[in-house]
Image: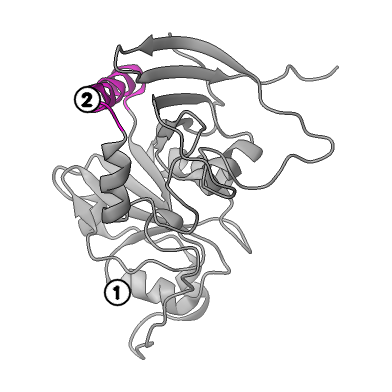
Amino acid sequence: MRVAADGDRPRVVVSVNTSVDGRVALRAGEPLMDEAAGRVWNALSPPSAAQLDKARAAQLAELYQPQAVLEGSGSFVPDTAGPLEHSPRPSEPSGEELYSDFWPEEVVGRAGREKWFVVVDGRGRIRWEMKSQGEYDVLVLVARATSTDHLAYLRRERIAYLVAGEHQVDLGAALRRMREQLGVTCVVSTAGGGLNGALLRADLVDELHLLVSPSVVGGLGTPTAFDGPQLGDDEAPRRLRLLAAHAETDGMLWLRYQVLRDPPEH
C-alpha cells in the first residue's frame, strides 16, 4: 500500500531498530555508530534480524525508491562535542558567499552517484573522512548560524551542503529544497531520537518502519526512537495506523505504521 505524503516535500520514512522499550542505543551520550556499542547492540538481536533488515530495505526500495538517507550529527560524535576548529585560508571564499548552497560539479556529476547520505550538522561538529561510498555522496544540512570557517572547510573538502534556517537547520525547508533542487521524493531517516523527534514535532514524518528486538535496555535518559522536545500543552500524541506486522519465532518484530494527520478544521 502506498501512502501519500505532502506534495511539496519528499516522503519521510523513519526506519530504525529498537528494543521492546523503544531504545535505540545502550546509554545516553554514546554515538550510535560507536564500534564497541554496535557490537553489543547487534549481539542483542536474534538470528532473523539481519534477514528482516534486508527485507525492510527491499520493501522500501520497491515502494518508494528512496534517494536519500538522513542522519543527525549525534550519530557520529558525542553530545559533548562542540564545533570543530578550523584555520581559515586567505585564498578561500568568505562572508555572505559561503551561505549559498554548494554543489561541486564533480559530486553532482559523479558517475554512479544516485543517492545522498544527508547529515544535519548545523553546529559544524563532524570532520569528514569519507565523502562518498558506492551510489551515495555526502550532503550536509547547515544553517546561517553555522560558522563561515566550517562552511569554507566543506568547500575545501568538496562536500555538498545546503543552507536552510537561521539559528538551526530548518528541516521542513531543507526537505522542500531537496525535492526542488535534487528531485528527491523519499528520504529514509535512520537517525537517533533527537533528529527523529524534531521531524515528528515538525509534522514531517509519514511512515515508521520498525524492527523491534526482544530485549529491554531501560535507563532514564537512554535514547529512544523519538526524543527531542516534549509535547506542548496544546499538542497531542501522533496517532498511527498499522499497515503491516510480522513476527519471527525468535521474537523479532517488523512493524510498519502510517502517521495519521488530523483533518483540517473548518
Mark positioned earlier in the residue sequence (1 or 2): 2
Q: Residue at x 83, y 19 (%)?
A: 265
Q: Are marks 1 and 2 in contact (CB under 8 Å)?
A: no
Who's the residue at 22% across and 25% down the image?
Answer: 47
Q: Which residue is mark 2?
A: 47
Judging depth in this view, the residue of 251 and 163 nearest the camera is: 251
- Residue 16 location (% of width, % of height): 41, 34
Give neighbour class at mark 2: few <14, some 14-19, many 20+ (Cα, 10 Å): few
Identified by mark 1, the residue type is Arg
Is 171 on the left-hand or right-hand side of 214?
right
Tell me where the magenta segment starts and ends, as one range.
45-65
Q: Is residue 262 left or right of residue 224?
A: right
Count all numbered tags in the image, as a single digit: 2
Q: Secondary structure at mark 1?
A: helix
**Residue 241 appears at what percent x and percent y?**
57, 13
Does 164 appear above or below 145?
above
Tag 1: Cα neighbours inside 10 Å, few (<14), some, or many (≥20)? few
Q: Image height check: is 172 above or below 84?
A: above
- Along the viewing direction, whichever of 104 and 151 lies nearer the viewer: 151
Residue at the bottom extreme, as displayed: 90
- Can residue 219 be seen from the camera position used here? yes
Disc 2 residue type (three-letter): Pro
- The kind of secondary structure the magenta stretch mainly shows is helix
Q: Which mark is residue 156?
A: 1
Which residue: 22% across, 22% down? 51
